[in-house]
Amino acid sequence: MEAVAFAYDDRSSIFTDLNLEIVSGVTLLSGENGAGKTTLLKLAAGVEKPDAGRILVNGADLWRREVAARSDLAFLPQEPDVTPFATIREVLRLVCRLRSQPAEQVDEILAETDLEAEADLSIRELSRGQRRRVLLAAAWIGTPQTAILDEPLDAMDEGWRGRIHEWLEELRKNGGLALVATHEAGSLAELADRLLVLRDGEIRELDSPPGTGTTWRTP
């Protein structure tokens, strides 16, 4: 991110001159509720467009060279902001097309995420945990090497938390990049190459997670 400014309206500026470089490895982002973590991730993933500045993914501008920037980018939002009427199979087929992946990968990813029985249901017919797995399935299509994750452990049981942990480990091992917003450090902190805190629209880097428990916030 280079000199990024963003506001939802004229009275509520979130960022005015944000500069942030994320390199390969796992970067954890913390901050108080309302600090702007989700907004930052949406900007990084190209869901929100900055009012000023630019955002580069692997050297490509997210809003000028969208195909190049987004082809290797996966976003796992905290809430399943997916069309409520399309079936899960239809959503995943769309992701395959966007990432130039064969349609056959849909069946593979449905099996991998234990969603075969729900494939022809819409997102509104699923439990919260199942909805989160749909987002995970979409993120895994094409094995993108740039991942933006917002509270990835939320609504996941221990088994799925372990699989997310393994995904991040694999990304890290293969030279990929993950930016993860979380209030639960736990095992994620053990994976982290970098720890950031967002406060008052600015980023500060930490040497280690504050405190000794599994929850960490801005000191």
Image (tube, rainbow, N blue to C red):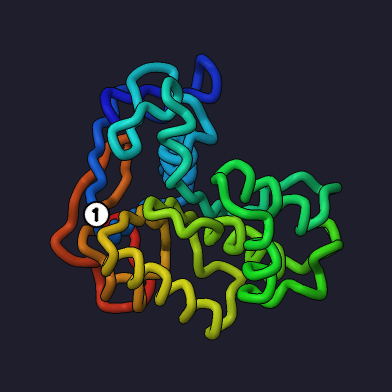
Quarter of the picture containing the C terminus is bottom left
Left or right of 27 in this view: 107 = right
Q: Quadrant of residue 78?
A: bottom right
Which residue: 81% across, 69% down? 118
**Residue 115 coordinates in the image, percent (x, y):** 73, 72
Residue sitting nearer the eye, 219 or 137: 137
In this view, the residue in front, 179 or 106, is 106
Q: Position of residue 124 (x, y in %)?
A: 83, 56
Q: Quadrant of residue 128?
A: bottom right
48 shown above or below 35: above
Q: Is residue 30 visible?
A: no
Q: Quick one: 31 or 107, which is closer to the camera?
A: 107
Evaluate whether residue 101 shows in this view: yes
Q: Residue at x 24, y 54 (%)?
A: 24
Dot 1 amino acid type? Ser
Query: What residue does disc 1 label?
Result: 24
Left or right, 34 with respect to 208, comes to right
Image quarter hosting the N terminus: top left
Q: Going 49% across and 50% down the picture, which residue do you hit?
A: 74
In this rendering, the answer to whether 175 lies above or below 16 is below
Please name the residue shown 41% across and 75% down the image. Answer: 165
Bin the neighbour count of mark 1 within 10 Å (Cα to Cα): few under 14, some 14-19, many 20 and up.
some
Residue furthest out toward the bottom:
159
Query: Residue 136: image x %, image y %?
Result: 58, 63
